[in-house]
Amino acid sequence: MIAFDGDAVVFSEESDLIYKNDGLKAFFEHEQINAKNPMNAGPFGQFLKKLSELRAEHIFEPGVSKVRIGLVTARNAPAHERVIHTLRAWGAPADEAHFVGPNSKAPFLRAMGAHIFFDDQEKHVLGAASVVAAGHVPGPHSPDQVVIPAG
């Protein structure tokens, strides 16, 4: 399984910037208003789309592929809906999606059996590296800055 964080990795940093500039309340309002509007692709957006095509080529049972895709993001309700609509609009289904809020991502990655994980925040990469190979995707923010904490 290849697992990804969402914002500023698979998706653009648009939502991160709303949180950074206007706060958590504005972020949640923006995501609720735009819940059915797909997000723009981030640095790994095209990679996810191509990986989804590869996943589709290797389905051996209805809905089950040898190529598995996971999403582990700090987003939680009500901001999760936009992620789901975006993945559907892109034709890029995730085999597992976890909206973990303020919780550590490592236990979810271990339970999923992830083989590699990509995140834009160094602290999440370092935390995940204890259970899975983890890669840092440089993001639009300081490594010390929390991005979209759970409400």
Image (tube, rainbow, N blue to C red):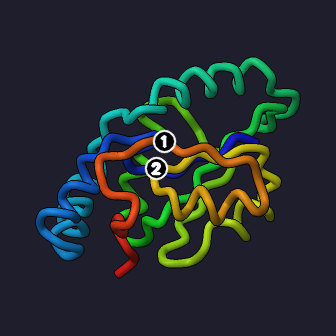
Q: Determine the secondary structure under disc 1.
A: loop
Vertical side of 111 occupied by 54: above or below: above
- Amino acid marked by disc 1: Val
- Look at 56% across and 77% down and name the residue there: 103
Q: Which residue is mark 2?
A: 120
Report x, y in % for residue 38.
32, 40
Q: Determine the secondary structure under disc 2.
A: loop
Residue at the left extreme of this rendering: 22
- Look at 18% across and 59% down and name the residue there: 18
Q: Which residue is mark 1?
A: 137
Q: Earlier in the sequence, mark 2 or mark 1?
A: 2
Vertical side of 88 occupied by 15: above or below: below
- Look at 25% across and 63% down and name the residue there: 32
Quadrant where the N terminus lies? top right
Q: Which mark is residue 113?
A: none
Vertical side of 77 occupied by 40: above or below: above
- Amino acid marked by disc 2: Asp
Viewer-proximal residue among 45 and 83: 45
Report x, y in % for residue 112.
77, 57
Corner quadrant of residue 25: bottom left
Corner quadrant of residue 59: top right
Corner quadrant of residue 116: top right
Viewer-proximal residue among 136 and 67: 136
- Look at 82% across and 54% down and name the residue there: 113
Instruction: For label 2, count other residues whose C-alpha is less than 10 Å away and answer few (under 14), some (14-19) or many (20+).
Output: many
Report x, y in % for residue 44.
48, 32
Viewer-proximal residue among 104 and 143: 143
Question: Whole-Å distance between the Cαs marked 2 and 1?
Answer: 5 Å
**Circle 2/circle 1 CB separation < 8 Å:** yes
